[in-house]
Image: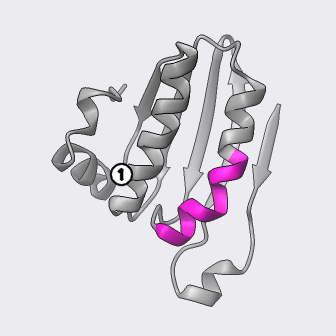
Amino acid sequence: MVAAVCRGAFAALYGGSAMNAAAKVSGNTLYIFLSGDLDEYGARLVRGAVDSAIEAHLSCDRVVLDLSGVPFMDSTGIGFLIGRYKRLHRAGTPLFVQAPTPAADRILSMGGLYTIIPKL
């Protein structure tokens, strides 16, 4: 199942890169692919869709967030990831980050996020 959500012209409203999310299940892993700026506006665009994908697939053994399409991330992005981590942790499902861009990797490293959300 692949679902693309939150595409649109929102980027024109605030001048950033529109945030998109897509989810795919492979084996017992839920992959969530994010693209666009993971900032206050971008996180707001995809939060509901990502949470819905997680809730629909809580039977999966793990969730992997692919950040290869995230050219910019700020502290709101860290908060977004921690929120998903907390939800999954309560369900006993591990969360991983995959393929962060150099900008996202820097923020995640500086924020110490890899101690709770490992990078694959």
In the rendered image, the residue lying farthest to the left is: 110
Using the image as rendered, state which of residue 57 and residue 26 is in the foreground: 57
Q: Is residue 49 above or below residue 2?
A: below
Q: Is residue 83 left or right of residue 78?
A: right
Q: Is residue 46 above or below residue 31?
A: below
**SS class of the residue under badge 1?**
loop
Residue name at image x 71 percent, y 12 percent? 59
Q: Is residue 46 magenta?
A: yes
Where, by quadrant of the figure, is residue 22 drawn? top right
Using the image as rendered, state which of residue 70 and residue 40 is in the foreground: 40
Where residue 120 appears, x then y in whole percent?
Answer: 37, 25
Where residue 48 appears, x then y in whole percent?
Answer: 70, 51
Residue name at image x 78 percent, y 27 percent? 56
How many callouts does the rendering have?
A: 1
Q: Can you say which quadrant of the picture contains the N terminus?
A: top right
Residue name at image x 27 percent, y 38 percent? 113
Q: Is residue 75 left or right of residue 112?
A: right
Which residue range is magenta in the image? 40-49
Q: Is residue 87 above or below residue 111?
A: above
Q: Is residue 17 above or below residue 70?
A: below
Q: Is residue 45 magenta?
A: yes
Q: Which residue is mark 1?
A: 101
Residue name at image x 51 percent, y 80 percent? 16
Where residue 115 appears, x then y in whole percent?
Answer: 23, 28
What secondary structure is the magenta-colored segment mainly?
helix
Q: Is residue 77 left or right of residue 27?
A: left
Disc 1 residue type? Answer: Thr
